[in-house]
Image (tube, helix red, strand yellow):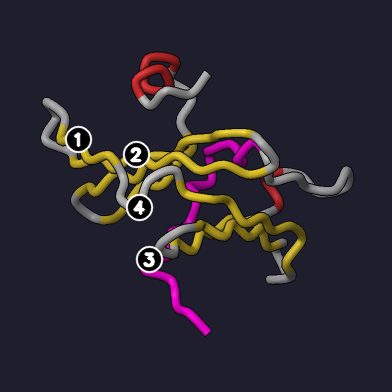
Amino acid sequence: MSFPEATYQLSSGCRLPKWLELSKNVHRRDVSVSADAYADRIVFKALDRQGEEVASKTAIRRNRFPTEVTGSDNIRRSYEVAMADGLNDAFVIEYKTGGVYFCMVDDPLTLKSLRID
């Protein structure tokens, strides 16, 4: 049994990864999403308000390590690209004072720089 290198909680205002599908009667606002990062993969899990798993997907990491950037705002960001079901998607992890922010990436320029169409 292997243990994740890191576990993140997707921020509540962020969209789901493209390949993490909820059933028709479950909505984004009704779930919390975690991501367990391993050396070669990331396991995304959606839990409902009762803590029951309603969706999960294992995505393959494009690179072993994320692309790290410190912006002019002095916030360190790690960008990660993962693939599942033939679809690439990207997320950002921001290390801010007071915590970590984890969200899917929608900015077209950032996606282009990460080579995602």
Give the x, y percent position of residue 78. 29, 43
In terms of sequence position, does the residue under pointer 1 or pointer 2 come before the other? 1
Nearest to N terminus: mark 4 or mark 2: 4
Please report the residue visible at 34 percent of the width from the left and 45 percent of the height from the top. Answer: 93
Tell me the kind of residue under disc 3: Ala
What residue sits right under mark 3 in the picture?
A: 6
Q: CA distance from mark 1 to mark 3?
A: 19 Å
Would you say residue 40 sits in the magenta stretch?
Answer: no
Residues rendered magenta in the picture: 1-18
Q: Position of residue 89 (x, y in %)?
A: 53, 35
**Badge 2: residue crowd in 10 Å (few <14, some 14–19, many ≥20):** many
CA gap, disc 4 and disc 2: 12 Å
Q: Is most of the magenta stretch helix, strand or loop?
A: loop
Q: Which residue is mark 4?
A: 64
Image position, residue 90 (x, y; %) = 47, 36
Tell whether 57 sits left or right of 79: right
Residue 20 pos. (x, y %): 68, 46
Pointer 1 residue: 69
Report how far apart the C-alphas of labels 4 and 1 lie in the structure: 16 Å
Q: Amino acid at mark 2?
A: Tyr
Residue pointed to by mark 2: 79
Q: Residue furthest bottom?
A: 1
Number of disc labels: 4
Amino acid identity at mark 4: Arg
